[in-house]
Image (cartoon, grey):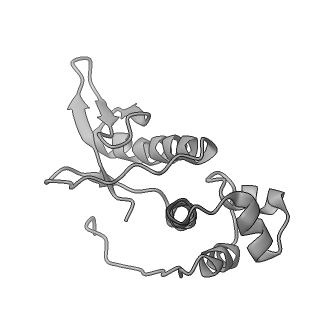
């Protein structure tokens, strides 16, 4: 759902620069492809947090077309899913707080991609928005 394609550009001095066609604010680099893709997760999460802070819709994910993709961590994906549902329904943070019976700082922390929210809180927020959180463990392409 949040698997954003990346462009990897080898640099003449060595290493790789990673950019995201769908998220121009996210850019990073690494000494090799693996390191660059690892750093790309943090760059993507940071850039997507800008959209949340600005109350802007999240960037649409374009087709990968054979390019590598990067996604935020599972917890951040769940938070992004709640934020996206809020955006699609026109629900503001104050309304979400009211529906959950929470105080605003609790909602702020829930939508903060750097805060380690509890999964049950994310599930509760998704539930009042008419959604549910699904967690699944799959075999990795790397092993």
Residue 89 drawn above or below residue 41: below
As rendered, which of 103 and 112 lies closer to the eye?
103
- The residue at the point 82 percent across, 57 percent down is 105
32 relative position to 105: left or right: left
Residue 97 drawn above or below residue 119: above
Q: Position of residue 16 (x, y in %)?
A: 28, 31
The residue most toward the left is 66
Q: Position of residue 9 (x, y in %)?
A: 22, 31
Identify the image quadrant of residue 97. bottom right
Quadrant of the rendering where the N terminus is positioned = bottom left
Residue 109 drawn above or below residue 138: above
- The residue at the point 54 percent across, 66 percent down is 89
The residue most toward the right is 103
As rendered, which of 37 and 117 lies closer to the eye?
117
Q: Position of residue 120 (x, y in %)?
A: 68, 79
- The residue at the point 66 percent across, 74 percent down is 125
- The residue at the point 68 percent across, 79 percent down is 124
Total marks in image: 0
Quadrant of the rendering where the C terminus is positioned = bottom left
The residue most toward the front is 90
Q: Position of residue 44 (x, y in %)?
A: 45, 45
């Amino acid at each position: 759902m949040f698997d954003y394609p990346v462009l990897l550009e080898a640099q003449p001095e060595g290493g790789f620069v990673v950019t995201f066609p769908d998220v121009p604010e996210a850019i990073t680099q690494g000494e090799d492809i693996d390191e660059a893709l690892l750093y790309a997760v943090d760059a993507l999460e940071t850039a997507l947090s800008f959209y949340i802070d600005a109350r802007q819709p999240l960037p649409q994910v374009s087709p990968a077309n054979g390019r590598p993709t990067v996604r935020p961590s599972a917890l951040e994906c769940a938070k992004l899913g709640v934020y996206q549902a809020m955006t699609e329904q026109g629900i503001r943070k104050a309304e979400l707080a009211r529906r959950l019976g929470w105080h605003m700082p609790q909602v702020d922390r829930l939508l903060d991609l750097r805060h380690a929210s509890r999964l049950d809180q994310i599930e509760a927020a998704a539930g009042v928005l008419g959604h549910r959180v699904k967690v699944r463990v799959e075999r990795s392409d790397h092993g």
